[in-house]
Image: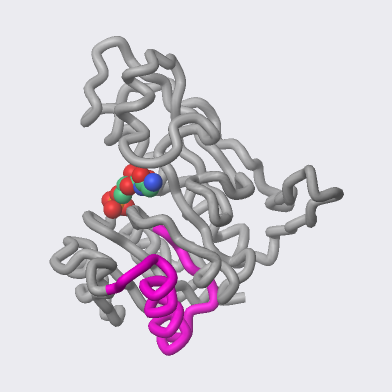
């Protein structure tokens, strides 16, 4: 199944680039139908344009509330032909307006081993807490902040002389791999979502036939 992706960004767009490169290389069965940035001038918009992908800027500041911002996203995503949505460095909390339009089909990449360090500056949070291992997570999005069902994670050690910049760069390299790993599994029809057994429990997700954890990165590259 070719995935029709809408990719939401706020900035640099290196995760978007990883998706575009994998599609161009034939290793991901997907099309990026539309890239939307909430920030005008986000460098990721240029990456999309260079790949011939339609782009839109939908500025959250032009909307009175999150619901009307999300409604504008949904309109654009539907018109663009997206059936899955990837939050790739999209620094806005999404609401049920978006989630109900793409139920179980909104994926986020986050630079920590969730549920540790949700929200912004996850890498700085990891350094501030002195954890020895952090990493990245790809998960389905729910209305909470980085709380949705986890699809896959990769671990990255925190090195004694790490700065936020160095740690972020090492995590980012794993993000690209992990995101592609998950999207390829979804495209292969290998995502199963098991509904909560009771109101007190959560949905359980599994990626059939592929490991949900990539190994601990032990090199300092
Ligand atoms: C990535 O590290 C991504 O995990 C993070 O923003 C960066 C975007 O990089 N997202 C979050 O922190 C969301 N809470 P990119 O624009 O180069 O893909």
For the image, the number of numbered tags is 0
74 sits to left or right of 147: left
Report x, y in % for residue 191.
69, 59
Report x, y in % for residue 103.
62, 69
Residue at 43%, 84% in the rendered image:
75
For the N terminus, the quadrant is bottom right
**Picture quadrant of residue 125:** top left
Query: What is the image's colouring?
Result: one colour
Q: Is residue 79 magenta?
A: yes
Nearer the observer, 201 or 107: 201
| Residue 29 in sight | no
Report x, y in % for residue 73.
39, 76
| Residue 81 in sight | yes
Residue at 33%, 72% in the rendered image:
35
133 sits to left or right of 202: left
Q: What segment is highlighted magenta in the picture? A: 63-87
Question: In the image as oriented, which residue stretches furthest toward the top?
Answer: 160
Look at the picture and state if 157 lies above or below 81.
above
Residue at 36%, 72% in the rendered image:
69
Q: Is residue 140 magenta?
A: no
Question: In the image as oriented, which residue stretches furthest toward the right?
Answer: 197
Report x, y in % for residue 83.
54, 77
């Amino acid at each position: 199944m070719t995935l029709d992706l809408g990719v939401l960004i706020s900035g640099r767009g290196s995760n978007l680039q990883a998706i575009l490169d994998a599609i161009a290389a034939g290793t991901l069965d997907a099309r990026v139908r539309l890239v939307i940035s909430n920030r005008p001038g986000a460098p990721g918009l240029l990456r999309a344009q260079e790949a011939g992908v339609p782009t839109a800027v939908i500025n959250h500041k032009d909307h009175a509330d999150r619901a009307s911002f999300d409604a504008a996203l949904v309109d654009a995503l539907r018109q663009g032909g997206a059936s899955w949505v990837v939050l790739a460095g999209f620094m806005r909390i999404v609401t049920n307006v978006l989630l109900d339009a793409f139920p179980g089909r909104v994926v986020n990449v986050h630079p920590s081993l969730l549920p540790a360090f949700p929200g912004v500056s996850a890498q700085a949070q990891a350094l501030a807490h002195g954890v020895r291992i952090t990493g990245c997570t790809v998960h389905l999005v729910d209305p909470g902040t980085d709380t949705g069902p986890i699809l896959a994670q990769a671990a990255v050690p925190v090195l004694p002389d790490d700065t936020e910049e160095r740690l972020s760069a090492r995590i980012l390299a794993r993000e690209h791999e992990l995101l592609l790993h998950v999207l390829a599994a979804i495209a292969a029809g290998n995502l199963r979502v098991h509904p909560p057994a009771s109101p007190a429990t959560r949905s359980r997700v599994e990626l059939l036939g592929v490991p949900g954890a990539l190994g601990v990165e032990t090199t300092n590259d």
